[in-house]
Image (cartoon, grey):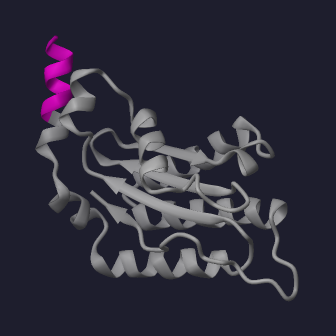
Amino acid sequence: MLDKLRRIARHRWLDEADTRKAIPPAMVERLKRRVAASEHRHSGEIRICVEAGLPTSYLWRGATARERAVKMFGKLRVWDTEHNNGVLVYLLLAERAIEIVADRGLNSRVTPAEWKRIVAAMGSAFQQGRIEDGLTQALEEVSALLVEHFPLGAAEQNANELPDEPVLG
């Protein structure tokens, strides 16, 4: 019970102001431009979501960052793309947790080891306080996978089915 209370306190200690401090408006704009540039090269959709802490209801039932990432994947409609190739890059500041959730079109073509490698590289950058570098590196690596598996033809354009701007909470 004490561990649960400590976890709740850690998550309630941080709020959206902490998220905006970690991801200031200038960084949001740069990340938005990077997502847009990436999506000019493939038919996939990439969303970034950064949250300070889990909602209290998640904490009381012992939910994980992965469960929240999957929920946000649905809430942000990342699953709802024509080619089933949306990807959510999720960062939970309170636990320094990183999750990547990919729709079935891409996930079926990428090994779990590859996703783990991308998450590990992001984690290394975050531990050094380089949040933007970690997110940029993840964007580049996810983009490379999407270009490999879902490239655009010479005359094709990405329909941009989802917003490019990161979601902060």
Q: Is residue 8 magenta?
A: yes
Return the residue nearer the eye: 26 or 166. Answer: 166
**Residue 11 point in image, percent of width and height:** 19, 38
Magenta extent = 1-9
Q: Compared to 138, does 75 lie above or below?
A: above
Please name the residue shown 68% across and 65% down the image. Answer: 44
Please name the residue shown 37% across and 75% down the image. Answer: 28
- Main SS class of the magenta portion in the image: helix
**Residue 76 point in image, percent of width and height:** 44, 57
**Residue 8 point in image, percent of width and height:** 17, 30
Q: Compared to 108, does 162 lie above or below?
A: below
Return the residue nearer the eye: 110 or 3. Answer: 110
Q: Compared to 50, does 31 lie above or below?
A: below
**Location of the C terminus (image quadrant):** bottom left
What is the number of callouts on the image? 0
Extreme right residue here?
Answer: 154
**Location of the N terminus (image quadrant):** top left
Please name the residue shown 13% across and 40% down the image. Answer: 12
Q: Is residue 115 left or right of residue 67?
A: right
Return the residue nearer the eye: 158 or 136. Answer: 158
Please name the residue shown 66% across and 44% down the image. Answer: 115
Q: Quadrant of residue 151?
A: bottom right
Q: Quadrant of residue 94?
A: top left
Extreme bottom residue here?
Answer: 155
